Each structure stands twice: as C-alpha cells, then as structure tokens.
Image: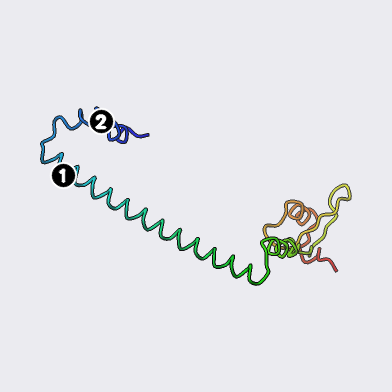
Amino acid sequence: MSDFVKVLTRKNSLRKQCQDMSVADVEKVLADLNEILEERHAEEAQAQAAEQQRMKKIAEIRKRMDDAGIGLDDLKAIKASEGPKRKVEAKYRIKGAGGTVHEWSGRGRTPVAFNEYFEKHGVTKEDTLIK
C-alpha cells in the first residue's frame, strides 16, 4: 500500500495532512474525490451489465444445447477426439559422432548438430535431404 493510500484511508493521517489547507482547497479535493467516486460507480454498473449480458447468453446457449440433446460432455469429447497437432516430418537426416542419427524438419533455426556437420564435412543441407 502506498503512502498516499495510507493517508487517504486513515482519518487521523488525512486530518493532519489537511491542517495547512484552506477550506476552499479541502472542498476542491472533496469535489474531485466525489467525481472519481461517481466514475467508479458508473464503471462498476457497466461491468455488472456486461456480466449480466454474458450470463444471459450462456443461459441461451445452454437452453439450445438442452433442446438439441447436447451435453457439455459431448463437446469435451469432440475436442478430445481432435487430438494433438500433427508432427512435422523430418526433411533432413545426418549421422553424427558415435552413429547417432539427427533429424530436422527444416523449420526454425538450424540445429547445432547440423551446423557442426555442415562445417566438418563441407556439405549443404540439400546434401542431407531424406530421399
């Protein structure tokens, strides 16, 4: 909590800070705070109205689903049946040190093992295409 908020939320601290202020200045601060309060009330009312609209739409969708005989489990089953994204097949293959096989789809940055292989053997990636 900032010092400013501490002063505003504690009556005695606020009183002490307002001691040297004129009545007109205190009234101005009070008017500004009331204006801010009204803005906040309006924002909250708007947020509540938006939430009510959202809940109304959800209720309409649930009713349509019930009328169609569709349950939430049915929707979850559809999403689960889609499965994960398809893996991109390897386009390039090399045999590294110790006989380990490295494969690369050709997407993204060139793997370190491929860069080292290209430098060591003086080949390009087209030379390592899987046929």
Nearer to me, 70 or 41:
70
Residue at 79% from the left image edge and 53% from the top image edge: 120
Q: Residue furthest right?
A: 99
- Residue picked out by circle 1: 28
- From the image, state whether disc 1 or disc 2 is nearer to you: 2
Rendering coords of residue 58 (x, y %): 54, 63
Rendering coords of residue 119 (x, y %): 75, 54
Residue 27 lies in quadrant = top left
Residue 108: which numbered mark, if any? none
Q: Disc 1 and disc 2: Cα gap in Å?
A: 18 Å
Q: Is residue 9 left or right of residue 16?
A: right
Residue at 37% from the left image edge and 58% from the top image edge: 46
Q: Is residue 27 left or right of residue 120?
A: left
Query: Which element carries disc 2, helix, strand or loop?
Result: helix
Colouring scheme, one of rainbow, by chain, secondary structure, one colour: rainbow
- Residue picked out by circle 2: 11
Q: Is residue 101 left or right of residue 28?
A: right
Q: Identify which amino acid the numbered label 1 is placed on.
A: Lys
Q: Identify which amino acid the numbered label 2 is placed on.
A: Lys
Residue 105 lies in quadrant = bottom right
Rendering coords of residue 52 (x, y %): 45, 60
Nearer to me, 75 or 66:
66
Q: Residue furthest bottom?
A: 68
